[in-house]
Image: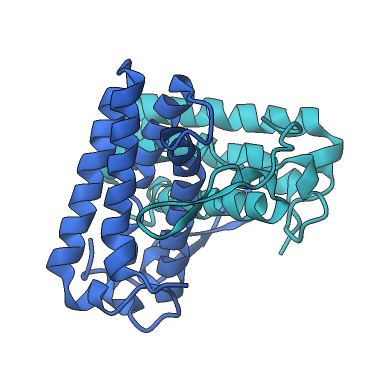
Chain colours: A blue, B cyan
Amino acid sequence: MRGKLVLGSLVLVLGSGYGVAVFAQAKPDVLVKQRQAAMVLQGKYFGPLAGMASGKVPYNAETVARNAGYLDALNRMPWDGFNENTKDEKSRALPAVFTDGAKFKEAINQSATAVAQLVKVSKGGDEATVKAAINDVNKSCGGCHDNFRAKQ
Amino acid sequence: MRGKLVLGSLVLVLGSGYGVAVFAQAKPDVLVKQRQAAMVLQGKYFGPLAGMASGKVPYNAETVARNAGYLDALNRMPWDGFNENTKDEKSRALPAVFTDGAKFKEAINQSATAVAQLVKVSKGGDEATVKAAINDVNKSCGGCHDNFRAKQ
C-alpha cells in the first residue's frame, strides 16, 4: 500500500459514541503515529526476549512463543506508515527511507524472515536455537534502525 | 500481570546500538504509552471494518480476515498496561478502571469473545454474518470506551 494512499480521511462516528478513522492511514500525522505505535509494541514484546538471549532475564519458552506470535503480527504493521506523504512529518525516519526504498524494503524483508524463523523455532525449539533466532531478530531490527533512523 | 508489576526498568543497550527496555512495563509512563499504542493500532485495523459494516467502505473479505487476525493479537496487548501504578498518569482512563476492576475485566473479556468470533466467521463466513460480527466487536469496544474512558 506504500506510495499509493491518497484516500481522504473519512471519519465515522459509530453508535457507541466514539470516532474511528476509516482511512486514517491517509493522513501523514496519523500514519506516523500508527507506525510509531507498532514500534512501541515491538519494543514491549521484543525487549524481554532480548533480555533472555543476553542472559539478563530468565529464559521462559512460553513467553518467547507468545511474544514471537505478537511480533509476527506487529512486524506487518509499521511499513505502510512510511508513505511518501509522511516525509516532512517530524519523526526519526531518515530521508533514506524515501530515497532508498529498495534498501529499506530489503531490510523489512530481512526482518520478516528473522521473525518468521523465531516463530518457527519458538514452537518447541531448544533454548540455544531460540536464543540464536532472537539475536537474528535483533540484528534485523538494526537493519532499519542503523540506516534509516536518526540517532536520538 | 495486572497489579503485580513492580519490576525495575532495566534497559539493555544492544549490539545494534539502540536500547530496549526489558521491563519497561513497570514504568507508569511507558505502560500508558504502550497501551495507547495498542489502541492506536486497534483503530487502524478496526476502522476499515467498521466502515464496511456500515456500508461506507466496500466490503473486502480478505481485508476483514487479515485485520481480524491483527485485532486478535492487538486485543491481547493493552490490558496489562492498566496497572494500578498508572492511575495518576495523564490519560483518558477513568478512575473506574482501578476502582471497578471486575467490571473492567468483564468488558475486556466481552471484547475478547467478540474478536474471537470475528476471527472465526472471517474465515469464509458470508458477508452478513461477518458484518454482524464486526458490529459486535464495535459494541464490545464501547463496553470500555463508554464506561472507563473520559469523553474527549
- The quadrant the C terminus of chain B occupies is bottom right
- The quadrant the N terminus of chain B occupies is top right
Q: Position of B26 compared to B15: left or right?
A: right
From this view, report whether residue B124 is shown above or below residue A5. above
The residue under the point 34% across, 37% down is: A134
From this view, report whether residue B135 is shown above or below residue B113. below
From this view, report whether residue A69 is shown above or below residue B95. above
Which residue is at the front of the view, B104 or A22?
B104
Quadrant assignment, res A148:
bottom left
The residue under the point 28% across, 39% down is: A115
Residue B117 image point, x, y percent? 45, 25
The residue under the point 44% across, 42% down is: A46
From this view, report whether residue B41 is shown above or below residue B64. below
Which residue is at the front of the view, B66 or A48?
A48
Q: For residue B104, say whether it is visible.
A: yes
Which residue is at the front of the view, A59 or B91?
A59
Which residue is at the front of the view, A50 or A18?
A50
Q: Position of B125 compared to B5: left or right?
A: left
The residue under the point 15% across, 57% down is: A106
